[in-house]
Image (tube, rainbow, N blue to C red):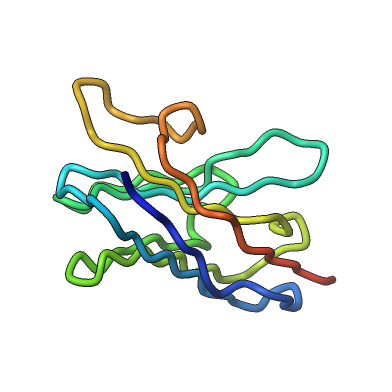
Amino acid sequence: AVQLAESGGGSVQAGGSARLSCTASGTVYRSTCLGWFRKVPGQEREGVAFIYMDNGTTSYADPVKGRFTISKDNANNTLILQMNTLKPEDTAIYYCAATRLGSIAPALVPRFFTYWGQGTQVTVSS
């Protein structure tokens, strides 16, 4: 099993930046995909970005392309989400997620991911 713990977040003004971290522990294979999702009350959880731990392949949701950057530190099993030019609509609880890569490539949808962190709040004020 994989345990995930997010940190970072908080309150920031529109146009500002924030950085989220996620530390993975337990049995973390190289063939793991780590991702970020976010959820607003009353809405479905939506994908933000993911990255493959082995080769660094990334995928981003359209609303965050060009503003958010996902990266990893394999030595420390840490996932980073650098968020720039934040908008009020980026306000959400952000979750770190992980899944083993198999024969089917994951998509940025929650059902592809097995392990989840507890989430961290990001609030962007206008």
Instruction: Give the x, y percent position of residue 116.
Output: 48, 46
Residue at left offset 64%, top offset 38%: 45
Instruction: Give the x, y percent position of residue 16.
Output: 65, 78
Q: Which quadrant, please, contains the C terminus?
A: bottom right
The quarter of the picture where residue 122 lies is bottom right
Q: Between residues 12 and 20, which one lies in front from this camera angle?
A: 20
Q: Is residue 9 left or right of residue 78?
A: right
Residue at left offset 31%, top offset 44%: 1
Q: Is residue 93 left or right of residue 126?
A: left
Q: Is residue 77 above or below residue 27?
A: below
- Tally the marks: 0
Instruction: Give the x, y percent position of residue 39.
Output: 68, 46
Residue at left offset 77%, top offset 62%: 88
The quarter of the picture where residue 103 lies is top left
Instruction: Give the x, y percent position of residue 98.
Output: 37, 45
Residue at left offset 15%, top offset 49%: 30
The quarter of the picture where residue 4 lies is bottom left
Q: Is residue 114 left or right of residue 63?
A: left
